[in-house]
Image (spheres, coloured by chain):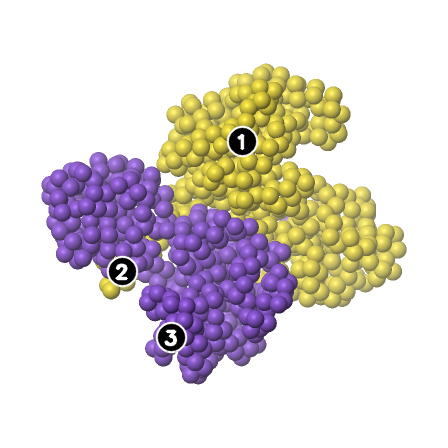
Chain colours: A yellow, B purple
């Protein structure tokens, strides 16, 4: 591993280009590695992490010290901080990835043609994944392990704040790869903190990166989406809606609203806007807003809502377009499910939306006419998570419509190919 | 419809931007149109094509006349030419698309979580497809109909050679849309021949094009792949390989070789390189090459092959990288299936490869270790076609690994979303 100051004197473009070539070369043996071999590597990584706790904590202390000198915010310092428990959590996360079914080689579909050809569509790895992330050092392990499980090589580019912790964690991943006889280049970490390295990754490393996954704040995701010349799995924001239909059970609506907004306000599946059917304005609106306010939520509403609930602040047009990621919700009345669909199709970031309703027709319209990655009926938006979907660990949630949509887990990190079995068939002219 | 000379005085960027906006607006009603409504439109299109044969032929005569004045090649003139039979073929192609199952709304996967949440993954349209093609006027109808079936709006940009024919065919498609009460903007044709229009499409029309499909020669596909800022479904070339294992049945190998190379030499699934197991050099090589030569195929081989079959010309390094699309084949001996895999992974365009073998282990290695879209055992490479796969009409074949791979039919023109049904579930902290 190069020290940042040594590397700075080298040509970043050359370093990155070399990494791309090595990743591509590693991708081939990885693609045909057995499930046993990949799992052996993953378990060895978890063991290495546990065995090297003192080294990882010492490296983390270097990051924390630099963070204090740079006066990082308390939130950033908390993300950066590792302790024995967090390292154990990272190791256990890798063990859960080892326990997942291997997607590679699984048959997605099979059929026979009238001429006897037997066709199978089987999962294959995607190739080389580039992951660009900010300060959380655990992403190094999560992303590395998830890509390996799906048979992909990965190039990890973490933020400069966590460079020492990431480097120590990365050493454990390499130890696991080597213990299983897999190429160390399967999981590479960009050794330079120069931002030009990100630019090189976004340009695709001469065709040696197949997809980029950004993990971090809006600024990072925006830059990646704007500049990447290769496909990106990402969501810019989660402006998630909760719609309470006139037919909703009030108790259920109230519980779901409080959970969707307040369970954790900082995650992308947190509700940001509450839409209430005008038909339920007299019955449901005030009890739900009261429960939200009691849970500590600030309420910003249109004038119609404020007539019924004057404690609310006034919502502006900007509020409908805002992902608060905080204990704030915007509220408006709409004309039934049609009005909810109109609002959501206008303002949503197409991540996750939920409806609370007893009337089946309203649910079907909501499910059919809204084009978001995840739609829920009578359940909290906070279930928008690969683990909650039963998909295991996820590398992120995608709002794009190409290839992956919603939680991006091991299956979404694969492609497919066709295997066709014949007994001498030739095609007639 | 604007005449080219009128349009030339307008701002191409503005025209294209308006088309993008209208396509996006049309995509929403289209996404929720019923299968019946879409099929009604398709059948009305087919009827309109049959009813307007004289107008289409008159428009085609304009194109042909211009083609003669521009001294187009005989091949191009043939592609351009329409007659009553070809128009009937186009109409019948649209009727087959109407007969396909509607992919939109079909459930790809469903499962239940321990907490009772029922999760479905269902197909949705992709959105807006941009199709950029050359002189074949039938692509106007095929691509328009296929995109409509999958619930997508489409922007068609045909070559200037076929502008009048495409315009007449497009009028029939619009008639079909209107007969079914669907927005005419669902299938738009770029009304200007200015090449800047292609540049605007490749830039993505301000987020109003979700994927580009190029249909045409290498120059077009190369430009699209290089310049597109949105995903592309395409294959640049089909350098397809046929490998004859030592365990192959000779009669089968000979028939498959002649069919794979000679049935139609100009299609992307035609074999370009024949690899023969060194173990079969004495038994299989000469009979197969003799059959190919008798079928009219020119043979270019390495020196080892030429010792056994001196009639062959000498193959150079360049031959292994060449898609002849003609009655020429390159031939070399390899060390068993491992040697074949090495050659293919080095030179293939990852489109389609076939193995002829009786030995199961060789087949499994070929199927596992080669990363091409389509792999065949004991069958001709010329089956690489959406129709032959039972997928119905295709808009092309993709060699990329993101989203679509292999034949791109209606299913591949869709995305998906998750529908989650609960009964009041909230997520525990």
For residue B272, above or below residue A36: below
In the rendered image, the quadrant that contains the N terminus of chain B is: bottom right
Determine whether the residue tagged by mark 2 lies in a helix, strand or loop.
Answer: loop
Is residue A275 shown to the viewer in this render? yes
Q: Chain of mark 1?
A: A
Q: Nearer the viewer, residue B205 or B208?
A: B205
Q: Is A203 placed above or below B228 here?
A: above
Residue A404: x and y in percent read 52, 48
Q: Residues within 10 Å of mark 3 (few under 14, many from 20)?
A: many
Q: Is residue B81 left or right of residue A212?
A: left
In the rendered image, residues at marks 2 and 1 fall on the same chain: no
Can you tell which mark lies on residue B176? none
In the image, which disc is placed on residue B82? 3
Q: Are marks 1 and 3 on the same chain?
A: no
The residue lying at 19 percent from left, 46 percent from top is B313
Q: Which residue is mark 2?
A: B264
Q: CA distance from mark 1 to mark 3?
A: 53 Å
Q: Are marks 2 and 3 in contact (CB under 8 Å)?
A: no
Q: Chain of mark 2?
A: B
Nearer to us in this view, B425 or B76: B76
Can residue A380 be seen in this snapshot?
A: no
Residue in the picture at 62% in, 56% down = B206
Do dots 2 and 3 share one subunit?
Answer: yes
In-image side of A118 versus A206 (left or right): left
* Protein chain holding label 3: B
Residue A218: quarter of image: top right
In the image, A336: left or right of B327?
A: right
**Residue A13 numbered mark, or none:** 1
């Amino acid at each position: 591993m190069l020290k940042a100051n040594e590397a700075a004197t080298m040509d970043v473009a050359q370093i990155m280009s070399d990494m791309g070539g090595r990743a591509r070369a590693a991708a081939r043996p990885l693609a045909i590695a057995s499930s046993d071999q990949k799992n052996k590597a993953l378990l060895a990584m978890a063991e290495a992490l546990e065995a090297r706790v003192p080294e990882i904590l010492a490296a983390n202390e270097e990051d924390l010290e630099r963070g204090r000198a740079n006066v990082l915010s308390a939130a950033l310092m908390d993300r950066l901080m590792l302790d024995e428990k967090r390292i154990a959590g990272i190791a256990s996360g890798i063990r859960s990835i080892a326990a997942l079914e291997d997607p590679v080689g699984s048959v997605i579909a099979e059929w026979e043609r009238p001429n006897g050809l037997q066709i199978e569509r089987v999962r294959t790895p995607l190739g080389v994944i580039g992951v660009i992330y900010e300060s959380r050092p655990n992403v190094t392990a999560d992303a590395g392990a998830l890509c390996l499980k799906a048979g992909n090589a990965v190039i990890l580019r973490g933020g400069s704040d966590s460079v020492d912790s990431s480097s120590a964690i990365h050493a454990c991943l390499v130890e696991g790869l080597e213990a299983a006889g897999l190429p160390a280049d399967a999981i590479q970490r960009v050794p330079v903190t120069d931002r030009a390295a990100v630019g090189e990754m976004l340009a695709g490393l001469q065709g040696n990166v197949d997809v980029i996954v950004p993990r971090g704040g809006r600024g990072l995701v925006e830059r990646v989406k704007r500049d990447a010349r290769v496909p990106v799995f990402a969501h810019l924001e989660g402006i998630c809606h909760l719609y309470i239909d006139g037919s909703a059970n009030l108790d259920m609506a109230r519980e779901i609203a409080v959970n969707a907004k307040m369970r954790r306000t900082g995650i992308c599946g947190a509700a940001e806007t509450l839409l209430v059917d005008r038909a339920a304005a007299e019955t449901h609106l005030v009890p739900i807003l009261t429960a939200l306010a009691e849970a500590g939520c600030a309420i910003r509403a249109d004038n119609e809502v404020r007539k019924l609930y004057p404690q609310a602040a006034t919502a502006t047009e900007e509020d409908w377009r805002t992902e608060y990621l905080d204990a704030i919700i915007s509220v408006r009345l709409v004309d039934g499910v049609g009005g909810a669909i109109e609002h959501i199709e206008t303002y949503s970031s197409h991540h996750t939306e939920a409806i609370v309703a007893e009337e089946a027709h309203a649910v079907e319209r909501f499910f059919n006419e809204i084009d978001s990655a995840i739609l829920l009926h009578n359940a909290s938006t906070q279930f928008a998570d690969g683990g909650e979907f039963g998909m295991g660990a996820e590398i992120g949630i995608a709002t794009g419509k190409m290839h992956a949509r919603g939680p991006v887990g091991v299956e979404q990190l694969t492609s497919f190919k066709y295997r066709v079995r014949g007994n001498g068939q030739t095609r007639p002219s």
